[in-house]
Image (tube, helix red, strand yellow):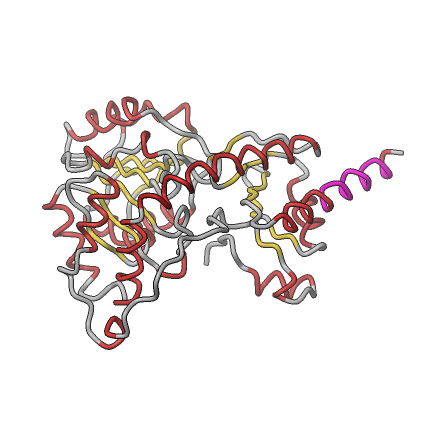
Amino acid sequence: MLEHGGALREAAQRYGIPLENWLDLSTGINPLPWQGAPPAWAAWTRLPEADDGLAEAAQACYGAPHALPVAGSQAAIQALPLLREPCRVGILTPAYAEHAHAWRRAGHHVTPLAADQLDAAADFDVLVLGNPNNPTGQTFAPATLLGWHDRLARRGGWLVVDEAFSDATPEASLAAVSNRPGLIVLRSLGKFFGLAGARVGFVLAEAALLHRLAEPLGPWCIAGPARAIAKQALSDRDWQVATRARLRDDSTRLADLLTRHGLPPGGACALFQWVETPAAQHRHAALAQTGILTRLFAQPASLRFGLPETPAQWQRLEFALSNLDNATLRRLG
């Protein structure tokens, strides 16, 4: 099992702090999620129907020619490697670990790539990266991505771009050109919309590939109520515009707060800040002892901080960071 953010029950047991007393900053999920009308009761009693307008709502929201709804982008991450014979796969690192895990499990040869090695795309059959990348927040210009895609596609290769954190910066998305052969874009309702529990995501690609991908996923891979909620959220343009502005402001506020306390971020997006520090494990444990959960990474040693939700949570984080500063000064003194 790979580690992920949001493991609150495990943290509560480990540190002896009741579940309800935690401030979870480990996931990068929007703490103020989209909220709308609950689905009609029929959504619970009827089998989901593929022609309910969900795919069309995603196409309109993302500006994509085609969209396949899936049970979270995780479902696509696990299924895509099954559509190719074993081949050479380059994956940006550090990254969401499920990508490399899925390709290796399917028998592919996976090579981790640093950001400055991605120009070697022509050496691989598949190139996988996040834009913005998780956890570093690094972004890549559409022109750069399309240059890599062109080199791959000429040899029948794929460029897989995980855009799970891209809703706050739609101008950087490749959704509009995702029908190009060999280009696969993954989107999720779990981060920007804050609907991680709904398990709804989308694959944007050419129609023929989406047809191939749909077969191993099977019918009814998304529950009816989740489909109804997702369709509403994707259609709420006013909420999306307001949320983009709020997230940008909150992310800047978080960066300033961390910098003031000796943790200047080395990467970020609108939903999180990433801090590379040799003391990552110590800082993670010290914050956890106060009931604040961050996402710890071993390679490189770093922490990812999601956004607090309420004024009280912002104050709680600042108080905890101040106490860490004071403890450090006492040790040095």
Residue at x 32% of width, y 30% of height: 172
Query: Could you tell me residue 46's position as x and y percent?
Result: 20, 74
- Quarter of the image for residue 47 reads bottom left
Query: Could you tell me residue 104's position as x and y percent?
Result: 34, 48
Residue at the extreme bottom: 45
The segment highlighted magenta reads 320-331
Residue at x 36% of width, y 40% of height: 167
Residue at x 48% of width, y 35% of height: 248
From the image, which quarter does the C terminus lie in?
A: top right
The residue closer to the viewer here, 51 or 137, is 51
Give above or below for 187 relative to 11.
Answer: above
The residue closer to the viewer here, 231 or 154, is 231
Residue at the extreme right: 333
How many numbered discs sit on the rendered protein? 0
Q: Check residue 130 for magenta coloring.
A: no
Give above or below for 322 relative to 138.
Answer: below
Query: Could you tell me residue 282's position as x and y percent?
Result: 70, 45
- Quarter of the image for residue 323 reads top right
Give above or below for 209 relative to 183.
Answer: below
Q: Main secondary structure of the magenta part?
A: helix
Query: Could you tell me residue 113's position as x and y percent?
Result: 40, 32
- Quarter of the image for residue 36 reads bottom left
203 relative position to 192: left or right: left
Residue at x 44% of width, y 36% of height: 245
The residue closer to the viewer here, 253 or 84, is 253
Give above or below for 174 relative to 59.
Answer: above
